[in-house]
Image: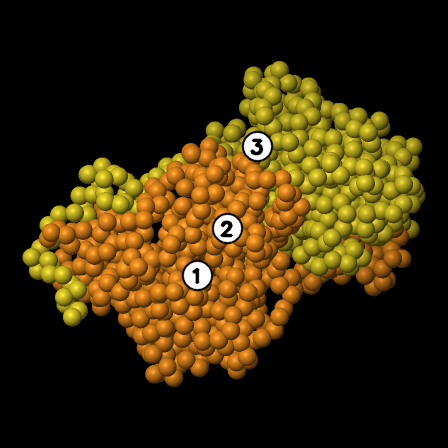
Chain colours: A yellow, B orange
Amino acid sequence: MYDQLRFDYLSCAGHPHLHTPNFDRVAAKGLRFTNAFCQSPVCGASRMSFYTGRYASSHGAQWNGFPLRVGEHTLGDHLRAAGMEAWLIGKTHMKADAEGMARLGLAPDSIIGARQAECGFDVWERDDGLWGEGPDGFYDEKRSPYNAYLNSKGYPGTNPWADFANAGLRDGEIASGWMFDNADRPANIREEDSETPWLTTRVLDFMAQAKGPWCAHVSYIKPHWPYIVPAPYHAMFGPDHVPPATRADVERDDPHPVHGAFMGNRIARAFQQEEVRRKVIPAYMGLIRQCDDQLGRILDTLEADGQMAGTMIVLTSDHGDYLGDHWLGEKDMFHNPSVKIPMIVFDPRPQADGTRGTTCDALVEAIDLVPTFVEVAGGTVADHILEGRSLIPWLHGATPQWREFAISEYDYSVTPMRDVVGVSSRDARLFMVFDGRHKLIHAEGGFRPMLFDLHADPEEFHDLAKGDAHGDVIDRLYGHLARWGRRMSQRVTRSDAQIEAMRGRSLTRGILPFLKDGTEVPEAWLQAYRGPMEQDFRADRAEDQE
Amino acid sequence: MYDQLRFDYLSCAGHPHLHTPNFDRVAAKGLRFTNAFCQSPVCGASRMSFYTGRYASSHGAQWNGFPLRVGEHTLGDHLRAAGMEAWLIGKTHMKADAEGMARLGLAPDSIIGARQAECGFDVWERDDGLWGEGPDGFYDEKRSPYNAYLNSKGYPGTNPWADFANAGLRDGEIASGWMFDNADRPANIREEDSETPWLTTRVLDFMAQAKGPWCAHVSYIKPHWPYIVPAPYHAMFGPDHVPPATRADVERDDPHPVHGAFMGNRIARAFQQEEVRRKVIPAYMGLIRQCDDQLGRILDTLEADGQMAGTMIVLTSDHGDYLGDHWLGEKDMFHNPSVKIPMIVFDPRPQADGTRGTTCDALVEAIDLVPTFVEVAGGTVADHILEGRSLIPWLHGATPQWREFAISEYDYSVTPMRDVVGVSSRDARLFMVFDGRHKLIHAEGGFRPMLFDLHADPEEFHDLAKGDAHGDVIDRLYGHLARWGRRMSQRVTRSDAQIEAMRGRSLTRGILPFLKDGTEVPEAWLQAYRGPMEQDFRADRAEDQE
């Protein structure tokens, strides 16, 4: 998994300037899903959906730093039940439910507690990849060993991540990667010491000792900001390689209030400047190209070790990056650059031979991966918990009955845009429904929706909900959303098989309700409730009362 | 709490023949809510909503025997946080989430484990009040001491609950209360040994030793079936006291498929016979009258001990009982005899003086009790977890902005009616939306809804959704249901206050994303990311790569 990697910044997905031979190498061996969506265009919520196989509104960890509720079933729970290990190597953005763990008496340093605190993974290496300053730093809770690694390599200071890995130099001073103006500088670090190669080495360390069957969540922070990359990647792409922004003036004409609010935020205003795009996007492309080279190391090792034939590979991302498209930066909303994700799956088994090198345009969601992996592990997919569906049929050339619409959600309650829009914490929520052609975005709080027709308007410029002409489409998509809202998402303690076993059981387990005189059931069922009463108890108790 | 007590089988609610002076005594001192609804007309799901303050689809324990998910917050969690104990005396219908507890390593015999297994209560006495035969008996998991009590009082056998407390005598043989034909017989037990007085004595034992502040969930199984009651209650009411069934032929004319299926089940067919109603309903009334007398013992004790002025009292039920109305027996559906519940609240504080002896027709839901109790306990109502609202404003004479509609749900996946209706386990679900006048029932699986206008048709005979005339009302109520479906129900790990505290925090915690050149933020924030680089690190790393 990559972080903030757009679906279309890969050569196999058609990028005109960014060559990604190793992504393409997997795509050539596997199946590339061209309509894959994250469950929420923000790291934490999206990842918790990847790790639980459940929608953001189902697992409840709806934004960064919202803890995943204690006891929520994770990929690790499902895989271990099927006899497969689940390891973390990299980023999760998980925040432990410390209150819930304390309430249930779970010690953070116990195996169970540690797994609860890490989305169910056993940790080979955790590295969330963003290091603030000071004891209250934003991602401080789990310190990865990356800074210690950098110190061991001679980079000084308490936060060499900030001073070297994510900063360049200007006139002998630190030129922080936090500032877009520095994005065209090389990071002040040996390339092999930068974060992506370092984590890749840790992946190879893991693979060298791992005994199957295992699942490894290899999770890079890149190409997520800060947008700065070491040489030679900083110089591979320049302003000439930056595609024009996908944006149109009509988008700023009476925009939906939520889109309007996001268009006015700091990141959007920055990316609305061409000079920012021309500096940042080449760095973003360089970060991706570095990721591709490091992917090559893993693929080469799998091939050299003879493990490729026994290893499923999935390449994906938690969400995209607007990069100035639609007058926006970051993610947060539901245009394709943000909500659509790369999803390339290599299944080494012969049953997948028929789909190698092809694409599939089915509506795929991030939550489909957990059931896919459970099926690969030989387990039973817990449909009463998992809301996604296994992708194996598609991989094996079948055309299963499939979902009619994809859902994504966004909770912006902690963002400054909530004040701009003027909604409560509870109403600061967006829902996307996409049926393969029309994309409806519903905003709580009494606003009109947004509607795009991706057949007629693949660039999503024209919000059809502004007019009156598409009421039938809007109603139909709202019908989908209502159906989804009523979905069975929390009946997690009873499987479908258990429900089948429970049916009609009361009558055979000693409870005989609703009999008029007993003739309704076999005589044998009544015997426990019949028979002569001992003499002492034959007196009518009513007489005792007199 | 009583079990299966109809809202209208109390004299304060207008019953013409059943005098309930002690219920009325509380109603005269308190406020009676005339539009109170259970969250699901079945014991287990309803109770889990009472105990969690959350809708059935939110806590997920949607039918009897579906375990409440480990870690779900309960009344006990909320009250203990506010310094109040939460004790169970009687029935909960709780099934522990044994799988979840094992997964989290919770020992059932630890304090935390025991509370998890008992909906968060500390157990003074658990008595679910239905005793099947054999080790596999339906309610066997938690054996109450009631049978041992009966043995100690001289009633022999392994299941004196079945043989005495819930059976009469016929020709010297056990006449089981499981059979409606025996409902007019006195139970073969001394009245003071029957279940309701026994539990009341346990309540008085509790009160005698309790030190405040405490909350006691006093939870009687009665007047739930088996319909049989000891003397003298068995003879207090006869066929002349049985109201005519509230049913009409039009209900059987092209009924909704789900209503049709339930009308054809065994309990419905039994209650469609007048001879059953004429035997069972007098017993049901006798059970209620016995409950009323035992309530009097508690009220008298509170008064004698001087505790009345410091004790809030709530009288309610988990759901009603059709008793033949609408051609149905039991509960399961959403006509008022099933879904409406008694809700009488005595608040001893002077602020409630203005509402004593009055009624309130606001749309009240079972989930409103947990926030009410938390407020009484002096705690902060956790709105991000609790879906109900405190009733205190109503009790204190205010008229708060209130909900526009009440919701109830029913999951019939384990019932035989699912086969009759012909739906999957996942679609065997019903939703009620009631706005104070119109009641819409939605059935998953592609059916038309049901619609009743309780102003024009208070008896709920005429399903308006059969015609085409009420599309606008149906659309409006479906809009309510859709809004409810999108509700924020699982964001339980972040309170509104925590969300406020998180707003905009990243900028002050060492993460400085989205700066163009740093001029956007105070200079002080940048200092950690600036400064001269040591000589060794001034070399352009790009050169190292050459």
The kind of residue on which mark 2 rests is: Glu
For the residues labelled 3 and 1, the Cα–Cα distance comes to 44 Å
Up/down of B474 relative to A297, above or below: below
Q: Quadrant of residue A422?
A: bottom right
Q: Residue at x 32, y 60 (%)?
A: B241
The secondary element bearing badge 1 is classed as loop
Q: Quadrant of the C terminus of chain A?
A: bottom left
Left or right of B85? Residue B432 is right
Residue highlighted by disc 2: B460
The kind of residue on which mark 1 rests is: Phe
- Which chain does the residue under circle 3 lie in? A
Left or right of A128? Residue B388 is left
Contact, mark 1 vs mark 2 (Cβ under 8 Å): no
Relative depth, front residue between A150 and A59: A59
Q: Mark 1 against mark 2, which lies toward the viewer?
A: 2
Residue highlighted by disc 1: B7
Q: Quadrant of residue A49?
A: top right
**Marks 3 and 1 on same chain:** no
- Which chain does the residue under circle 2 lie in? B
